[in-house]
Image (tube, rainbow, N blue to C red):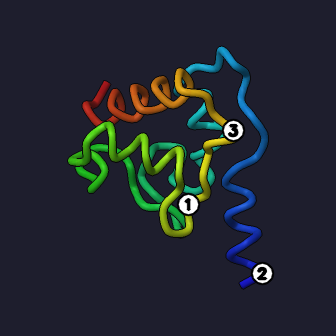
Amino acid sequence: MVIAVLSLAACSLGRPADDATGEEIYAQLCARCHGADLGGVAVGPALGPGSDSAGETDEFLRFTIVKGRGRMPSFEQTLDDAQVDRLIDYIREVQQGG
């Protein structure tokens, strides 16, 4: 239990700069759990091309980021709407091979 809590805490370190790019937000808040290449790691599933999330709607991704899901924490108090938009745009860009 303690290891799981520490792992989740490591997935959400600090608040990104207000003008951070989607890639910067991902690197700061998501990469530890979902992998630097969006390929997934032990804690978080893959988000990149061919992943289950690639077939989900932007609204689903937004809800998951803002409210959390399963072991994933909520980022409602960490990210504003524009930052969430930039993060989703970055994830979609990587999923499309860009």
Give the percent coordinates (x, y) of residue 45.
43, 61
Type of amino acid under label 1: Met
Side of 45 relative to 22 (left or right): left
Circle 1 residue: 72
Answer whether labels 1 and 2 touch (C-beta < 8 Å). Answer: no
Q: CA distance from mark 1 to mark 3?
A: 13 Å
Residue 59, above or below 52? above
Label 2 element class: helix
Q: Mark 3: which amino acid?
A: Thr
Which residue position is annotated with label 3? 78
Please tell me how crowded label 1 is: few (under 14), some (14-19), or many (20+) other residues with Cα within 10 Å: some
Element assignment for label 1: loop
Which type of secondary structure does the marked residue at label 3 adopt? Answer: loop
Which residue is depicted at the point 62% across and 52% down? 32
Q: Report the quarter where the C terminus lies.
A: top left
Q: Position of residue 43 (x, y in %)?
A: 55, 67
Quarter holding the N terminus is bottom right
Q: Nearer the viewer, mark 3 or mark 2?
A: 3
The quadrant holding residue 36 is top right
Considering only vertical position in the picture, is 22 above or below 28? above
Amino acid at the residue labelled 2: Val
Mark nearer the N terminus (1 vs 2): 2
Q: Nearer the viewer, residue 80 or 27?
A: 80
Please name the residue that numbered disc 2 is placed on.
Answer: 2
Q: Label 3, label 2: how many angstroms apart (C-alpha)?
A: 23 Å
The answer for how far apart the CA atoms under marks 1 and 2 are is 15 Å
Give residue 51's position: percent from left, percent from top. Answer: 28, 53
